[in-house]
Amino acid sequence: MALSEYMLEDDIHPIDIVENLAAYHDWDFDRIGDDQIAMAVEGQWRTYSITLAWSGYDETLRLVCTFEMEPPEDQLGRLYELLNLMNDQCWAGAFTYWPEQKLMVYRYGLVLAGGQVASPDQIDTMINAAVLSAERYYPAIQLLVWGGRSPREAMQAAIAEAYGRA
């Protein structure tokens, strides 16, 4: 059954949809306000902090997915080079590093101009894409920062696919 079948109202606030999805998936969440929600989503490598906020001004549902990271100062140039390579592979969303907060960040904005309404399936896909992207590139970041690999070598961990079964 599609997630959208759980919600029958046509004109539901996007953050209400996110709150219902968080409850559906049993994610820890906190409704920060009418237009913002924060949640924790468990991945294979980390627990990701995800915040979604609705901006009525520009009709955009903004997603920010973060995880803590403290690379040595001398690795920041190489990290930024890796982020450029990662972003070349990401068609929806982009990564950045916020050094003051020591956070790796994946951001995405879903524009719903003209009164468009996001479906629960659409928002669920948006959240899952953020977690999957963070999971995909987490090993590359670790290899670069702590493993001494070059940005291109580290990317091989993210783009190489495993074949077979264990």
Image (cartoon, rainbow, N blue to C red):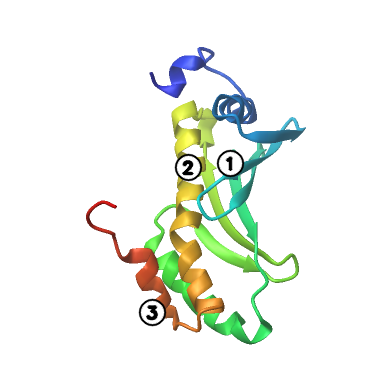
Which is nearer the eye, 94 or 143? 143
**Residue designated by label 2:** 128
Q: State the SS at label 1.
A: strand
Cα separation, mark 2 vs mark 3, equals 26 Å
Question: Which of the two discs, 2 and 1, labels the residue nearer the N terminus?
Answer: 1
Residue sticking out furthest to the front:
166
Q: Residue at x 68, y 71 (%)?
A: 70
Q: Badge 1: how crowded within 10 Å, few (<14), some, or many (20+)? A: some
User: Percent from the top left, x then y, of residue 141?
Assistant: 51, 70
Q: Badge 2: how crowded within 10 Å, few (<14), some, or many (20+)? A: few
**Residue designated by label 1:** 60
Contact (Cβ within 8 Å) of mark 1 with mark 3? no
User: Percent from the top left, x then y, of residue 23?
Assistant: 61, 26
**Residue designated by label 3:** 153
Disc 1 marks which amino acid?
Thr
Disc 2 marks which amino acid?
Asn
Q: State the SS at label 2.
A: helix
Q: State the SS at label 3.
A: helix
